[in-house]
Amino acid sequence: MNCYSYPQGVDWKSLTLPACLPITTDYFPEDQSLHNDYVVADYNLLPDDIEEPARPSSGSKSLTTRLVFLELVSQRLAQGFQMIMLPEKNPTQTVDVYGNNPRYSGLGSLLRTRSRNDESSEEYRLSIGRIFHKILLYGSTITVTIYRPRHPYPQLKRQYKYRFQAPDMSSYEVSWVEFRTERLETYMWNHLDNYICYRGESPDYPLIEPLKFWRFRVLLVPDCFRTATRTIMDAGAGVPCDIYNQLTLEEQQTTIEGFLRFVEITVHRLKRPINARKSRVST
Protein backbone atom coordinates (compact mmCIF):
# COMPACT_ATOMS: atom_id res chain seq x y z
CA MET A 1 0.00 0.00 0.00
CA ASN A 2 1.29 3.44 -0.85
CA CYS A 3 1.98 5.21 2.43
CA TYR A 4 1.56 8.60 0.77
CA SER A 5 -2.10 7.89 0.09
CA TYR A 6 -2.88 8.52 3.74
CA PRO A 7 -0.83 11.53 4.89
CA GLN A 8 -0.65 11.96 8.65
CA GLY A 9 -0.73 15.30 10.40
CA VAL A 10 1.74 16.60 12.93
CA ASP A 11 1.43 15.21 16.44
CA TRP A 12 0.92 18.61 18.07
CA LYS A 13 0.56 17.11 21.54
CA SER A 14 4.19 16.01 21.47
CA LEU A 15 5.37 19.56 20.84
CA THR A 16 5.82 21.76 23.89
CA LEU A 17 7.32 25.04 22.76
CA PRO A 18 8.54 25.13 19.14
CA ALA A 19 8.93 28.27 17.06
CA CYS A 20 5.34 28.20 15.84
CA LEU A 21 2.20 26.48 17.10
CA PRO A 22 -1.43 26.44 15.99
CA ILE A 23 -3.65 28.88 17.82
CA THR A 24 -5.57 26.10 19.59
CA THR A 25 -4.71 22.98 21.55
CA ASP A 26 -6.69 20.43 23.55
CA TYR A 27 -4.41 19.62 26.49
CA PHE A 28 -5.00 20.75 30.06
CA PRO A 29 -3.50 18.96 33.10
CA GLU A 30 -5.65 16.81 35.33
CA ASP A 31 -6.65 18.13 38.75
CA GLN A 32 -4.18 15.88 40.55
CA SER A 33 -1.33 17.08 38.35
CA LEU A 34 -2.27 20.70 38.92
CA HIS A 35 -2.23 20.11 42.66
CA ASN A 36 1.11 18.25 42.77
CA ASP A 37 3.19 19.74 39.96
CA TYR A 38 2.09 23.35 39.73
CA VAL A 39 2.19 26.54 41.78
CA VAL A 40 -1.11 28.41 41.63
CA ALA A 41 -1.61 32.17 41.82
CA ASP A 42 -4.82 34.07 41.21
CA TYR A 43 -6.17 37.60 41.46
CA ASN A 44 -9.38 39.49 40.71
CA LEU A 45 -9.96 42.50 38.48
CA LEU A 46 -12.95 44.83 38.85
CA PRO A 47 -12.97 47.21 35.86
CA ASP A 48 -16.34 48.68 36.84
CA ASP A 49 -14.97 49.79 40.22
CA ILE A 50 -12.29 52.06 38.76
CA GLU A 51 -12.78 55.59 40.03
CA GLU A 52 -13.83 58.17 37.49
CA PRO A 53 -10.63 60.27 37.75
CA ALA A 54 -8.65 57.20 36.73
CA ARG A 55 -10.72 56.74 33.61
CA PRO A 56 -9.41 58.28 30.37
CA SER A 57 -10.36 61.92 29.95
CA SER A 58 -9.51 62.14 26.25
CA GLY A 59 -13.10 61.52 25.18
CA SER A 60 -12.52 57.91 24.15
CA LYS A 61 -15.12 55.32 25.06
CA SER A 62 -14.57 53.47 28.34
CA LEU A 63 -13.94 49.75 28.19
CA THR A 64 -16.67 47.51 29.50
CA THR A 65 -15.83 44.58 31.75
CA ARG A 66 -16.29 42.11 28.92
CA LEU A 67 -14.06 44.13 26.58
CA VAL A 68 -11.36 44.11 29.25
CA PHE A 69 -11.88 40.37 29.62
CA LEU A 70 -11.43 39.78 25.88
CA GLU A 71 -8.38 42.05 25.81
CA LEU A 72 -6.71 39.93 28.49
CA VAL A 73 -7.19 36.91 26.25
CA SER A 74 -5.92 38.75 23.18
CA GLN A 75 -2.77 39.88 24.97
CA ARG A 76 -1.91 36.29 25.81
CA LEU A 77 -2.47 35.18 22.24
CA ALA A 78 -0.16 37.99 21.11
CA GLN A 79 2.52 36.66 23.48
CA GLY A 80 2.40 33.18 21.92
CA PHE A 81 -0.23 31.44 24.06
CA GLN A 82 -2.53 28.79 22.63
CA MET A 83 -6.24 28.65 23.35
CA ILE A 84 -7.23 25.37 25.00
CA MET A 85 -10.35 23.87 23.48
CA LEU A 86 -11.89 21.28 25.80
CA PRO A 87 -15.22 19.47 25.42
CA GLU A 88 -17.99 21.68 26.72
CA LYS A 89 -20.28 20.62 29.49
CA ASN A 90 -24.01 20.27 29.02
CA PRO A 91 -25.26 23.83 28.37
CA THR A 92 -28.28 23.20 30.61
CA GLN A 93 -26.07 22.21 33.52
CA THR A 94 -25.77 24.67 36.40
CA VAL A 95 -22.21 25.42 37.46
CA ASP A 96 -21.31 27.16 40.70
CA VAL A 97 -18.13 29.01 39.73
CA TYR A 98 -17.61 30.14 43.31
CA GLY A 99 -17.67 26.63 44.75
CA ASN A 100 -15.19 25.13 47.16
CA ASN A 101 -12.53 24.66 44.50
CA PRO A 102 -13.02 27.02 41.54
CA ARG A 103 -9.46 26.51 40.30
CA TYR A 104 -10.11 22.89 39.39
CA SER A 105 -13.63 23.25 38.08
CA GLY A 106 -14.48 21.20 35.02
CA LEU A 107 -15.44 24.07 32.75
CA GLY A 108 -14.50 23.96 29.10
CA SER A 109 -12.18 26.39 27.36
CA LEU A 110 -15.03 28.75 26.62
CA LEU A 111 -18.33 28.21 28.41
CA ARG A 112 -21.38 30.37 28.82
CA THR A 113 -23.67 29.22 31.57
CA ARG A 114 -25.97 30.45 34.31
CA SER A 115 -25.27 30.41 38.01
CA ARG A 116 -27.75 30.37 40.84
CA ASN A 117 -27.82 34.16 40.84
CA ASP A 118 -28.58 34.14 37.10
CA GLU A 119 -25.30 35.87 36.29
CA SER A 120 -23.56 34.80 33.10
CA SER A 121 -20.02 33.48 33.22
CA GLU A 122 -17.41 33.04 30.55
CA GLU A 123 -14.06 31.30 30.73
CA TYR A 124 -10.97 30.92 28.58
CA ARG A 125 -8.05 28.60 29.18
CA LEU A 126 -4.71 29.24 27.51
CA SER A 127 -1.25 27.71 27.65
CA ILE A 128 2.32 28.25 26.55
CA GLY A 129 4.76 25.44 27.23
CA ARG A 130 4.00 24.18 30.74
CA ILE A 131 2.31 27.41 31.85
CA PHE A 132 -1.48 27.51 31.96
CA HIS A 133 -3.82 30.47 32.44
CA LYS A 134 -7.50 30.43 33.26
CA ILE A 135 -9.45 33.67 32.81
CA LEU A 136 -12.98 33.70 34.19
CA LEU A 137 -15.59 36.43 33.76
CA TYR A 138 -18.35 36.18 36.36
CA GLY A 139 -20.71 39.13 36.56
CA SER A 140 -18.52 42.22 36.93
CA THR A 141 -15.49 40.30 38.26
CA ILE A 142 -12.61 38.93 36.21
CA THR A 143 -10.60 36.18 37.92
CA VAL A 144 -7.18 35.28 36.51
CA THR A 145 -5.64 31.98 37.66
CA ILE A 146 -2.05 31.18 36.69
CA TYR A 147 -0.51 27.70 36.95
CA ARG A 148 3.29 27.66 36.88
CA PRO A 149 5.39 24.47 37.02
CA ARG A 150 6.73 23.77 40.48
CA HIS A 151 10.06 22.71 38.94
CA PRO A 152 10.65 24.85 35.83
CA TYR A 153 13.19 24.03 33.17
CA PRO A 154 16.68 25.51 33.66
CA GLN A 155 17.53 28.48 31.51
CA LEU A 156 19.65 27.59 28.48
CA LYS A 157 22.41 29.85 27.18
CA ARG A 158 24.28 29.66 23.91
CA GLN A 159 27.02 31.99 22.71
CA TYR A 160 27.41 32.50 18.98
CA LYS A 161 30.64 33.97 17.58
CA TYR A 162 31.05 35.33 14.09
CA ARG A 163 33.34 37.52 12.01
CA PHE A 164 32.21 40.56 10.08
CA GLN A 165 33.79 43.25 7.96
CA ALA A 166 32.32 46.73 7.65
CA PRO A 167 32.74 48.59 4.34
CA ASP A 168 35.45 50.87 5.77
CA MET A 169 37.44 48.09 7.49
CA SER A 170 40.49 46.37 6.03
CA SER A 171 39.93 43.01 7.77
CA TYR A 172 37.36 40.93 9.61
CA GLU A 173 36.73 41.37 13.33
CA VAL A 174 35.36 38.87 15.83
CA SER A 175 32.05 39.59 17.51
CA TRP A 176 29.58 37.51 19.46
CA VAL A 177 26.04 37.41 20.75
CA GLU A 178 24.48 35.36 23.54
CA PHE A 179 21.12 33.64 23.12
CA ARG A 180 19.17 32.48 26.15
CA THR A 181 15.75 30.99 26.71
CA GLU A 182 13.24 33.29 28.33
CA ARG A 183 11.85 32.52 31.77
CA LEU A 184 8.18 32.65 30.84
CA GLU A 185 7.04 31.92 34.39
CA THR A 186 8.39 35.29 35.59
CA TYR A 187 6.37 37.43 33.18
CA MET A 188 4.47 40.20 35.02
CA TRP A 189 0.94 39.26 34.02
CA ASN A 190 -0.59 40.90 37.07
CA HIS A 191 0.98 44.21 36.09
CA LEU A 192 -0.10 43.92 32.46
CA ASP A 193 -3.67 42.95 33.32
CA ASN A 194 -4.01 45.93 35.67
CA TYR A 195 -2.48 48.18 33.03
CA ILE A 196 -5.21 47.05 30.62
CA CYS A 197 -7.89 47.40 33.27
CA TYR A 198 -6.86 51.02 33.93
CA ARG A 199 -6.22 51.69 30.22
CA GLY A 200 -2.73 52.90 31.06
CA GLU A 201 -4.03 55.81 33.16
CA SER A 202 -2.85 54.57 36.56
CA PRO A 203 0.62 55.65 37.80
CA ASP A 204 0.81 52.40 39.77
CA TYR A 205 0.81 50.31 36.57
CA PRO A 206 2.87 52.12 33.90
CA LEU A 207 3.98 50.63 30.61
CA ILE A 208 7.42 49.22 31.42
CA GLU A 209 10.10 47.42 29.41
CA PRO A 210 9.73 43.97 31.09
CA LEU A 211 6.21 43.71 29.64
CA LYS A 212 7.79 43.23 26.19
CA PHE A 213 4.94 45.06 24.52
CA TRP A 214 4.76 45.11 20.74
CA ARG A 215 6.79 48.02 19.38
CA PHE A 216 9.47 48.83 16.85
CA ARG A 217 12.34 51.28 16.91
CA VAL A 218 13.31 53.46 13.96
CA LEU A 219 16.65 55.15 13.35
CA LEU A 220 16.39 58.21 11.12
CA VAL A 221 19.62 59.23 9.41
CA PRO A 222 19.79 62.46 7.38
CA ASP A 223 20.50 61.74 3.73
CA CYS A 224 23.26 64.30 3.26
CA PHE A 225 25.82 62.08 1.51
CA ARG A 226 23.66 60.56 -1.21
CA THR A 227 26.13 61.20 -4.02
CA ALA A 228 29.11 59.69 -2.21
CA THR A 229 27.10 56.69 -1.00
CA ARG A 230 25.79 56.01 -4.50
CA THR A 231 29.36 56.13 -5.83
CA ILE A 232 30.46 53.45 -3.35
CA MET A 233 27.46 51.23 -4.08
CA ASP A 234 27.92 51.41 -7.85
CA ALA A 235 31.69 50.90 -7.78
CA GLY A 236 31.56 47.50 -6.06
CA ALA A 237 34.20 45.86 -3.87
CA GLY A 238 37.73 47.14 -3.55
CA VAL A 239 36.85 50.84 -3.64
CA PRO A 240 37.85 52.93 -0.59
CA CYS A 241 35.04 54.45 1.39
CA ASP A 242 36.84 57.55 2.65
CA ILE A 243 35.40 59.81 -0.05
CA TYR A 244 33.00 61.77 2.15
CA ASN A 245 33.72 65.48 2.29
CA GLN A 246 33.04 67.80 5.21
CA LEU A 247 29.79 69.71 4.84
CA THR A 248 29.87 73.47 4.79
CA LEU A 249 27.96 75.44 7.42
CA GLU A 250 25.23 76.27 4.91
CA GLU A 251 24.89 72.62 3.87
CA GLN A 252 24.67 71.55 7.51
CA GLN A 253 21.92 74.10 8.18
CA THR A 254 19.95 72.97 5.12
CA THR A 255 20.28 69.32 6.14
CA ILE A 256 19.14 70.02 9.72
CA GLU A 257 16.10 72.01 8.61
CA GLY A 258 15.05 69.35 6.13
CA PHE A 259 15.50 66.59 8.69
CA LEU A 260 13.48 68.42 11.36
CA ARG A 261 10.74 69.14 8.85
CA PHE A 262 10.57 65.45 7.99
CA VAL A 263 10.31 64.49 11.67
CA GLU A 264 7.60 67.09 12.31
CA ILE A 265 5.40 66.06 9.40
CA THR A 266 5.97 62.31 9.16
CA VAL A 267 6.87 61.06 12.62
CA HIS A 268 5.53 63.30 15.37
CA ARG A 269 3.29 65.64 13.38
CA LEU A 270 4.40 68.43 15.66
CA LYS A 271 5.04 72.04 14.81
CA ARG A 272 7.91 74.04 16.21
CA PRO A 273 7.19 77.57 17.42
CA ILE A 274 7.88 80.20 14.80
CA ASN A 275 10.36 82.01 17.03
CA ALA A 276 12.35 78.78 17.44
CA ARG A 277 12.62 78.42 13.69
CA LYS A 278 13.77 82.02 13.26
CA SER A 279 16.38 81.73 16.01
CA ARG A 280 17.77 78.53 14.48
CA VAL A 281 18.04 80.15 11.05
CA SER A 282 19.69 83.26 12.45
CA THR A 283 22.36 81.23 14.23
Image (cartoon, helix red, strand yellow):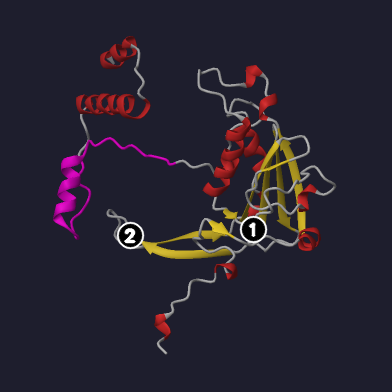
Q: Is residue 201 left or right of residue 277?
A: right
Residue at 77% x, 34% y: name it: 117
Circle 2 packing at 10 Å, graded few (<14), some (14-19), many (20+), is few
Circle 1 packing at 10 Å, graded few (<14), some (14-19), many (20+), is few
Residue 228, given in percent of the width and then of the height, sits at 17, 44
Residue at 22% x, 25% y: name it: 254
Q: Indicate the amino acid at tag 1.
A: Pro
Instruction: Give the number of the disc on residue 140.
Output: none
Closer to the camera, 129 or 89?
89
Closer to the camera, 13 or 222?
13
Which mark is first along the chain, 1 or 2? Answer: 1
Residue pointed to by mark 1: 87
Quadrant for residue 154, please give it. bottom right
Furthest-front residue in this view: 92
Q: Is residue 231 magenta?
A: yes
Residue 109, given in percent of the width and then of the height, sits at 64, 52
Tell me if residue 2 comes above or below residue 92 in the rendering. Answer: below
| Label 2 element class | loop
Q: Is residue 193 left or right of residue 9?
A: right
Q: Quadrant of the C terminus?
A: top left
Residue at 74% x, 62% y: name it: 30
Residue pointed to by mark 2: 165
Residue at 73% x, 54% y: name it: 106
Q: Is residue 124 left or right of residue 275?
A: right
Tell me if residue 50 comes above or below residue 149 in the rendering. Answer: above
Q: Could you give the CA–CA distance between mark 2 and mark 1, rounded to whole angstroms?
A: 57 Å
Residue 219, given in percent of the width and then of the height, sits at 36, 39
| Magenta-colored span | 216-244
